[in-house]
Structure formats: structure tokens, C-alpha cells
Amino acid sequence: MKKGWFLSYTGGALIGFMMVVAILAPFLTGYDPTNMALQDRFLFPSWTHWMGTDQNGADIFAQIVFGARISLIIAFSVVSVSLILGLVIGSLAGYMGGWVDLIIMRIIDMIYAFPGFLLVLTIAAVMQSASIAQVVFVLCLTGWASYARLIRGEILHLKTKDYVLSADALGASHLRKLVLYIWPNLVGPVMIQASFGMAVTIITESSLSFLGIGVPPSTPTWGSLLNSGRSFLLEAPYMSVFPGIALLILVLGFNLLGDGLRDILDPKNNS
């Protein structure tokens, strides 16, 4: 088996495992992730509480499996919206060229002039995000730029191909050339970018939750679990270890999938 296929299968298996956990969350645990039982504070992992309990007596395993839902929902939402925006804006820049391309690329340059996470952090702090929808909105404000730049570069190359020029000579409309001849050839690069984008989004969302400006505190997320656990590293290290492992598995899965797809779809690796 070639390296690319091995990486893709491994990454897909890790992602599939976490998706199954997220979907079956209510059936995997009998505990409410937000339920507090102060008499059960700081219980170490056991058959009753597989990953122990936190400072409020809440079951950590329940918080992790339900937190997987939040991470995946936000990641898929952000990547989907950013991809659609990037496709439209990048297509305009690459296909139209001229002043349209100039204006769009200067806006993208302005976004990239700031450190990515710092810009997201500033916007989130100003908006005082208090819901999943607001977190998605904040992440999409900057997330579309990477897709737009990628798509714009690919279209600049593709629109000079013979089959596009032939379609133009036959009188095909601009939309027809984009939809039938250009966009299908963007699938590979976009899939690779989206896979890495999922990993970045999950880390960014966890970082915002860790800093307390992500989703509401009452919502179980891996970032908030890590934030709670850092205060009890000596007496209850499992509070940080288990959510950290969950975050590692999911991010590693998307990165492996992206690396595998890049190896598979790169013509140089298939020659």
C-alpha cells in the first residue's frame, strides 16, 4: 500500500471513530455532562466513572463525548461556509482579473497581515461570543481567505487550458465555463485544504474555549475541560490528560487525511 493511501485510511479511521463517538454520545454514557454532584468531586477513573470526575463532580467521559459533537459541528460549519465564500470570491478574483482581482487580493493581504489566531481572538473578544453560531461566524470572518487565495491561484492556471479556451471559442457563458470546466478540477486541492482547515478550526475553537471566550461555559467543550484541568494538574491530572488525548486524536486524523490526499492527488507522486 502506498504511503498516501495508508495515511488517508489511518486519518479517516480516526475521524470516523470520533464521529461515531459524537453521534452515539447519549448511548455511550448514562451521565449528564452538565450535572453536578459535589459529593463525587475528583473521583479517579473507575468502572463507575471511566475518566473520573471534575471539581464539580461531573463525569469527564460524558463531557468529552458530548464535547466531540461541539468540535465537529463547529469545524464542519466553519469549513463549509468558508469554502463556499472562498469559492465565490476566489472565482471572481481569478476569473475576472483586473481591478476585481486587485481589490480582493488586497483585502486578503490585509487579513494575512495580522497573526491569524490573534485576529480571531480580537474579533471574538469584541463580539463577546456566547453561542455556537457566533463562534462559527467569527471563525468564518477570516477562514474564507485561505480558500479564496487557493482557488484564485488555481483558476488563473486553469483558465488558460485548451479545453477552457475551446469552450470559450464555442460561445460558452462564463458561468458554464466555471461550473463545467474549471470547478471540477478544483476538487482535489480544495479537499486537501479543507482537511487541514478542519484541524485548524478545531484547535482554534478549543483555544477560544480555553480562554473563556468561545461557546457558553455551560456547554461541554474540550477547550473548557483543559482550562478547568490546568488548575488541578497535581491532584487530578486526568482532567487534562483525557480531553487532550481526544483533541490529539481528532486533529491528527484530519492532518493525516490531508497529507494522504496530497500524496494521492499530487501528479508527481503518481508518475
Image: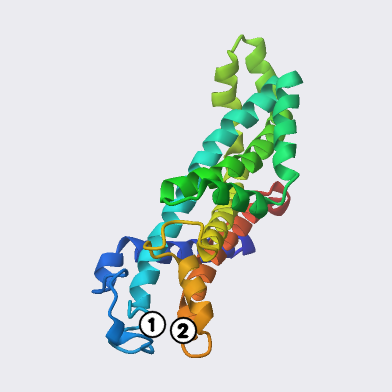
Is residue 5 in view from this perspective? no
Percent x, y for residue 115?
Answer: 71, 52
Q: Quadrant of residue 138?
A: top right
Q: Is residue 230 above or below residue 177?
A: below
The mark nearer the N terminus, 2 or 1, is: 1
Which residue type does callout 1 highlight?
Met
Residue pictured at 41% horizontal, 66% vertical = 17
Looking at the rendered structure, the number of numbered marks drawn on it comes to: 2
Q: Nearer the viewer, residue 213 or 255?
A: 213
Percent x, y for residue 159?
Answer: 70, 25
Label of residue 238 in the image: 2
Rounded to the nearest whole Å, what is the CA distance between mark 2 and mark 1? 7 Å
Crowd rating for badge 2 (residues with CA inside 10 Å; few <14, some 14–19, many 20+): many
Left/right placement of residue 15 relative to residue 57 reads: right
Q: Quadrant of residue 113?
A: top right
Percent x, y for residue 230?
Answer: 53, 78
Residue pictured at 56% horizontal, 51% vertical = 125
How is the model colour-coded? Answer: rainbow
Q: Quadrant of residue 41?
A: bottom left
Which residue type does callout 2 highlight?
Tyr
Residue pictured at 49% horizontal, 61% vertical = 12
Instruction: Quickly name the residue at label 1.
Output: 51
Percent x, y for residue 52?
Answer: 37, 84
